[in-house]
Amino acid sequence: MYCSPACRQKAYRARSTRRMAVLRETLRRSVGRGAHPEAVRSLHRSVASSMERAREQLARSRELCRVSELRLRESDVICRESLRKRAARAASTSDTERAWWLGS
């Protein structure tokens, strides 16, 4: 269980980084000890596809962060506008008039 989505994402990235390091080291050792060329090619493709998947996930994560930031800004603007309208209504209501939230 993670305290926030950011912590979960950070842990996921750390695990992905460790997996990539292990795959790279395995590939390096395979090439170094003269493993069967087809096995090396297969391992190389596996490493390449894992790295590409990690890049795609990182790009998606960044895109989601940008969208989230945009939504938060939009929400903030709407909230401020609503507060401004309420303040303007409250300022225009005299003491003898009925409060706007009580209806007519």
Image: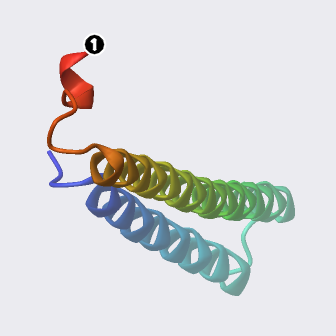
- Name the one closer to the observer, 14 or 37: 14
Work out whether 25 lies above or below 91.
below
Q: Secondary structure at mark 1?
A: loop
Q: Measuring 75% from the left and 60% from the top, which residue is drawn there?
A: 52
Residue 3 % position (x, y): 15, 54
Q: Which residue is mark 1?
A: 104
Q: Amino acid at mark 1?
A: Ser
Q: Measuring 43% from the left and 48% from the top, which residue is drawn there?
A: 85
- Name the one closer to the observer, 67 or 48: 67
Q: Farthest residue to the top: give it.
A: 104
Q: Farthest residue to the front: give it.
A: 96
Looking at the rendering, in which quadrant would you find the C terminus? top left
From the viewer's perspective, tell me whether residue 55 is left or right of residue 25: right
- Name the one closer to the observer, 87 or 67: 87
* Image-quadrant location for residue 23: bottom right
Looking at the rendering, in which quadrant would you find the N terminus? top left
Q: Measuring 15% from the left and 43% from the top, which residue is drawn there?
A: 95
Residue 101 % position (x, y): 22, 26
* Image-quadrant location for residue 36: bottom right
From the viewer's perspective, tell me whether residue 42 is left or right of residue 75: right
